[in-house]
Image (spheres, rainbow, N blue to C red):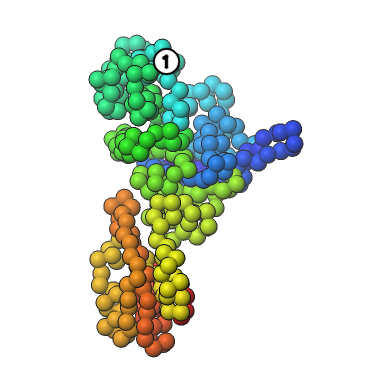
Amino acid sequence: MIELKDLNKQYRTPHGSLTAIESINLKIREGEIFGIIGPSGAGKSTLIRTLNLLEKPTSGRILINGQDITALSSKALRKKRQKIGMIFQHFNLLSSRTVRDNICFSLEIAGVPRAKQASRVERLMELVDLTDRADHYPAQLSGGQKQRVGIARALANQPELLLSDEATSSLDPESTESVLKLLAKIRDELKLTVVLITHEMEVIKQVCDRVAVLEKGKIIEQGKVIDIFANPVQPLTRRFIKSVIDFNLPTNLIDEHNSDQLIRVSFLGKSTHQPLISSLVRKYGVNANILYGKIDDIQGTPFGTLVLKLEGEEKLVKDGVAYLNERGLSVEVLNHG
């Protein structure tokens, strides 16, 4: 669906050139919700705005369904943009227009005949659950409702690609969850590809299929969301995950068991239901004392961790750790006793 090849964007400033994104290579599959996460100033907004050339890259190529949009004429680009919807952080609604008329605005600009506008807008208001607010003005709506209008407006021209630029960052938790569920529903019902940027790992956890982590304009890690949560590589990724799921052993337990053999065992999917720890005890004669444990759910996949104190002969303990690794568990030695 989307392929970015060696994408770069520099800005000229009074103090010289400023690199916003650098050497971005990325493939986004058709029909997936792809998340891009990074701290403030990482280049997230610049990156997503290059996907419809609101920001023109300094160099590199952007292919959408095999077509290089950086090579399009101005006229062809305007037509292409009609098939790329965009949701903004601050809604950008017209205060003098009702919900219905705000959604109509995109159709008017695109030159859609008036006879076709009404039926399309009615379907969109039903999709985003705003039929009963059709004649309300933005000032009469909650933040979540305003964003639903923004989503409906972004869908008005029946896009193939939907871009979300920090669409939930100004919403309360309840509205955020509602909007994320709506995006998943839209992806499934309309068969859209969705690209969203955020600085909140909870958003990635709830709705994304895959994720790329952006730091200082570069992608430092990417993959399936469940894999990134289970085995983060980069320190920034670990910090993001810790903000959502903190599997670290409490400090008081670390101090208390400083001289003991401690391991952290991470479970994913079906392995959470297997009696592997009891098998370890029986098979190797190792005592396994559970000091700490936690389990979470990532889009229907169980994900958990246990911190164990192992007691037994050194060779048997090592063999036991190898046994857990062989069965697909992630085992991290916290100290060697």
- Label 1 sits on what residue type? Ser
Q: Is residue 211 visible?
A: yes
Quarter of the rendering containing residue 8: top right
| 10 horizontally vs 283: left or right | right
| Percent of width and height locating residue 206 | 35, 46
Picture quarter with the N terminus = top left
Q: Is residue 84 visible?
A: no
Image height of 201 relative to 100, above or below? below
Residue for point 61% across, 35% down: 57
Quarter of the rendering containing residue 327: bottom left
Residue for point 37% across, 79% down: 310
| 186 horizontally vs 49: left or right | left
Label count reads: 1
Image height of 234 relative to 95, above or below? below
| Percent of width and height locating residue 12 | 70, 33
| Percent of width and height locating residue 151 | 37, 28
Residue denoted by label 1: 95
- Which secondary structure, mark 1? loop
View extreme (right): residue? 15
Residue for point 29% across, 75% down: 277
| Percent of width and height locating residue 28 | 45, 44
Q: Residues within 10 Å of mark 1 (few under 14, many from 20)?
A: few
Q: Closer to the camera, 268 or 25?
A: 268
